[in-house]
Amino acid sequence: MSIRKMSKGDRVKNFWSKVDKSSGCWLWTAGKLGKGYGQFLGNSGVISAHRFSYELHYGKIPKGMYICHHCDNPLCVKPDHLFLGTPRDNVMDCIKKGRFNSPYGESHWWAKLSNEQVTEIKERAKNGGIALRRMAPEYGVSDQCIYEIVNNRTRRKA
């Protein structure tokens, strides 16, 4: 029988057949998403396994809300390890648990300049001889970007 044609009871049984309950966390053992969260083909398509478990036990998840983990284990689907939270709650929980690691400098996804280039810009500005607005096209950034680097408003740690 196609998984899409399963009754709700069979779908739930299929879900729990993919869960290992042998430890404190109930671990999803089937398919995973990019960040390590389990995925399951729910009633209306693919859903994160922990969200499916939450809905089974607590009901529909309000739009825009997250299902967070007390245990910080993305594969865990144990209902009492899950809690409903806003995106802000999720970030605050992450910070509180010391897991927030925001990329900085050249490792940030928006960075156009390497740390070496930032250091070079600061040195060139300190030594004078070139207008800041003339440096911008050389590095492929705006005049404002050069100004903020030189005046330590951005990339202070470069």
Image (spheres, rainbow, N blue to C red):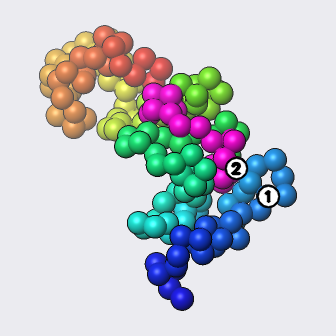
Pointer 2 local density, CA inside 10 Å: few below 14, some 14–19, many at least 20: many
Residue 78: numbered disc: 2
The span shown in magenta is 74-90
Dot 2 or dot 1: first in sequence order is 1
Q: For numbered disc 2, what is the local secondary structure?
A: loop
81 versus 56 height, above or below = above
Q: At 52% from the left edge and 79% from the top edge, which residue is drawn?
A: 6
Q: Is residue 35 in sight in this rendering? A: no
How many tags in the picture?
A: 2
- Left or right, residue 49 beside residue 44: right
Q: Is residue 114 in sight in this rendering? A: yes
- Left or right, residue 46 beside residue 17: left
Q: Quadrant of the N terminus?
A: bottom right
Q: For numbered disc 1, what is the local secondary structure?
A: loop
Q: Nearer the viewer, residue 113 or 17?
A: 17
Residue 110, image quadrant: top left
Disc 1 residue type? Lys
Within the magenta stretch, is there residue 109? no
Residue 111, image quadrant: top left
Residue that mark 1 sits on: 21
Within the magenta stretch, is there residue 85? yes
Q: Nearer the viewer, residue 77 or 72?
A: 77
